[in-house]
Amino acid sequence: MYNTHFLAESSRSTDKADSFADDNSTATLAEAASLGNLKKFVEDFAEFSGLHSNAEKTTLLQIGRIDPLPQGVVDLGFNVVDQVCLLGVTVDNNLSMFETHFDLVIQKISGIIEYWERFYLSLAGRISVCKTFMLSQIGYIGSILSPTNNQCKRLQDLMDKFCLGTMRVAKKKLYLPPAQGGLGLIKISSYTTALQCAWIKRSTEHWCDNWRFDLKKACYGNPLIANVNTFSRITNPVLHNICSSFGKFTLEFYKKDRNYKKALVFKNGMFKRGRNDNGILDENFFGNNRSFADFQQISKLKFDDFFVRGRPKSLHQTNMDSGVEFDLNCYMRIHESLQFYVTNRRDDEPVPDQSVGFFLKTFTKGSRPYRRILEYNVNSKESLSQSNTVTTFFRLLNTEIFDETLLKKSWGMWNNTFFLNTQREFLIQIF
């Protein structure tokens, strides 16, 4: 019923006019007839609704090539501008303002730091201020646009220096979770990537918007295969950022444990065609002459779908199960690619594998689950029992260190609640 109600919007029949609350953005030709009709529609709407639009406050922004407007358009009374502010984002005719948005965020965060530094807060207080007042400045637009590497470094340095104050702490401790002996600071690059991944999760739940329609069309109905190559940065910068971020996340997710067995093989950068071919399993690999329906089925195929009880399925069984007619050559090349990946992969612990689709259903919202996966390979290498902070703490208590499993469960709680601020700063700074 949900998709039926929004059927027109889902099929991109309403892509010329987008509204949020009382703000409307309409794309049309810069012609007197087209803009005149638009003005008439607004006036007709006001007649039966009582809601009026002020033409003098309504702005016209030319996109792309800028030509002098016809006199008929000027006479309509619209205000012609070079840029507009749309939901907090400044948009000009060639979208160049997107690149400078985070420079303004840096200025805002610098002002917040200047205000809070006068209070001489504890370490825990500074971290709370950072996560409460500074991250929100990044997260609003960071959920669709990514800062440049230079902007990201400047933001990270500003926030880290504020949190640490005069303390000197090892770099690897900054972003480790408290349960692993770290400070639990937020890594900006992982944070913006995680926020953007959340849009893919939303698109799997329903697709009543134009952007979801574009996403599913580009991914043959399965947005879980989205990656950096799904959209062009020039033609669609927002969806490019979202898909690029999700591609980074899935690569890290499939590296974890044995999740590669549930990895989608189509357009997955993990799976190369073979020892002497670094191409991926894309449309060219499977054959450009296939129908959209065929690629819809191929986009759902996982690593495990080509095996049964650990052995390759027969060509006939693969075709029957997948609903796609693979020839012998394609079948053999698929197995060559999958075997090449397994051969070059390190041995894993025998733990249950998990698919991305299942993972997205294990939580409702938030960036933490994504960040945990994005930083897993780095954080998992750190042994808590070998941390100087932990060993010093237990030595001061004259107590033996717990085993690693119990230690990880208890240390986070102690680090967040048991230690006084002065004790915590002493342990982290000195050891």
Image (cartoon, rainbow, N blue to C red):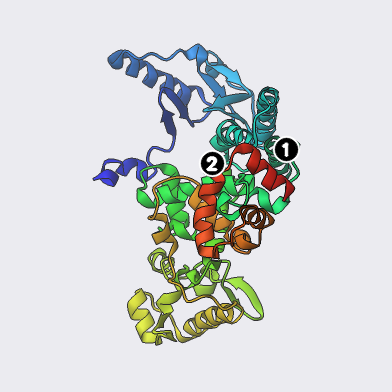
Left of 164 or right of it: where is 227? left
Left of 90 or right of it: where is 312? left
Residue that appears at 58% across and 43% down: 419
- Determine which residue is flagged by label 2: 143
Q: Nearer the viewer, residue 309 or 60?
A: 309
Query: Of label 2 and label 1, which has the lower sequence position?
Result: 2
Q: Position of residue 150 (x, y in %)?
A: 74, 43
Residue that appears at 50% across and 71% down: 260
- Determine which residue is flagged by label 1: 161
Q: Quick one: label 1, few (<14), some, or many (20+) residues within 10 Å?
A: few
Left of 158 or right of it: where is 281? left
Q: Nearer the viewer, residue 52 or 318?
A: 318
Three-letter amino acid code of the residue under disc 2: Ser
Placement of 51 over or under 235, stated as above or below: above
Three-letter amino acid code of the residue under disc 1: Lys
Of the 4 image quadrants, the one containing the N terminus is top left
Q: How far is disc 2 from disc 1 in space, using C-alphas?
A: 24 Å
Q: Nearer the viewer, mark 2 or mark 1?
A: 1
Placement of 242 over or under 402, stated as above or below: above
Secondary structure category for the residue under label 1:
helix
Placement of 5 over or under 406, stated as above or below: above
Secondary structure category for the residue under label 2:
loop
**How many discs mark residues in the rendered view?**
2
Whether residue 418 is visible to the viewer of this picture, yes or no, is: yes
Q: Position of residue 303 (x, y in %)?
A: 46, 74
Residue that appears at 50% across and 82% down: 335
Disc sitting over residue 228 in the figure: none
Q: Nearer the viewer, residue 353 or 20?
A: 353
Q: Position of residue 381 (x, y in %)?
A: 63, 64
Q: Nearer the viewer, residue 407 or 192?
A: 407
Whether residue 246 is visible to the viewer of this picture, yes or no, is: no
Q: Do the numbered discs 2 and 1 sit on residues whose CB atoms are within 8 Å?
A: no
